[in-house]
Amino acid sequence: MSQPIGVFDSGVGGLTVLKALRRKLPNHDFIYFSDTARVPYGRKPKAMVREFAYEIAGFLQQLDVCGIVIACNTASASALPQLADDLDVPVWGVIDPGVEAARRVTRSGHVAVIGTKGTIASGVYQSKLKALGLKVWAQACPMFVHLVEEGLADSEDAEVLARHYLAKLPDVDTLILGCTHYPVLAPVIQRVCGSAVALVSSAEVTADAVAAALGGNGAKGSGRVTHYVTGGVPAYLHTAEVIGGVEGQVIPLDVTRLSDAGRSVRSSVSSRL
């Protein structure tokens, strides 16, 4: 298998998922799509985010990817499972792996989840966790993405904001970081929650799921990564430093080119009906 795997997010948070994927699948090539021209997704209407996901997925399909990872909780909540049904390649999100990881980790059955406004408002984490018989507390933390992307994850402001968001945290033993930016804030979140609370990030378990579905690391690629960015490249490179930087070629893309890609997916679906 020499086709690349497509990975996309609204910004740099999905780079945490990309890193986990590259560790599991070092011989695979990857295309990472960062929609920084339209970031953040978390405060946008669900229908708008779903359309963004269709546009980006259509563009990645045009690049002949063998599968697509939605490395964004808001887009996963808005576009799955419909997008997976409509595409010709497998699609993975980050929510189901995170839910499964929390199920395995919790001892008490009491789980918390934090995420963007859009993810928490969708109720997708809550419904999936409750279906497993778990008790759930959820909290939107909309300013966390801004803190991460401004390089303020270790600041006093980050701790003040974390204490504000988690002030009503009940007695739980597991907390899901329901946004791919949030692992960068894990140290401060852990201090606020206490060491008895296990933090769950979906990056590693998502990588496990993708590796298992693709049959391990039988790829013939070189481990190359190509980045497509809808916003300014210098800003993307600067912001990505908080995740550990960017490796590979970075290609700017006019966001207006995506509308045709989204329509191509819709028309393909219509032709099959």
Image: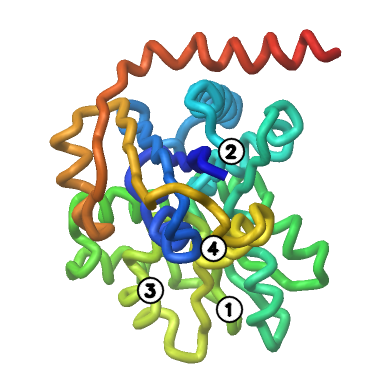
Give the Cα distance between marks 4 and 2.
21 Å
Determine crowd level at label 4: few under 14, some 14-19, many 20+ residues with C-alpha closer than 10 A. many
Give the Cα distance between marks 3 and 1.
12 Å
- Along the polypeptide, which appears first: circle 2 or circle 1? 2
The percent coordinates of residue 27 (x first, y second) are: 45, 56
Q: Identify residue type, mark 4.
A: Ser
Q: Identify residue type, mark 3.
A: Ile
Dots 2 and 1: beta carbons under 8 Å?
no
Q: Identify residue type, mark 1.
A: Thr
Q: Is residue 39 above or below residue 131?
A: above
Task: Out of 47 and 95, give the one closest to the viewer.
Answer: 95
Determine crowd level at label 2: few under 14, some 14-19, many 20+ residues with C-alpha closer than 10 A. some
1 vs 4, front mark: 4
- Mark identifier at residue 66: 2
The percent coordinates of residue 33 (x first, y second) are: 40, 35
Q: Is residue 138 visible?
A: no
3 vs 2, front mark: 2
Residue identified by numbered label 1: 174
In the picture, measured across the screen, residue 202 lies left or right of residue 156, that is right
- Along the polypeptide, which appears first: circle 3 or circle 2? 2
Query: Looking at the rendering, in which quadrant would you find the N terminus?
Result: top right
Residue placed at 60% from the left, 25% from the top? 47
Q: Tag 2's secondary structure? A: loop
- Mark identifier at residue 202: 4
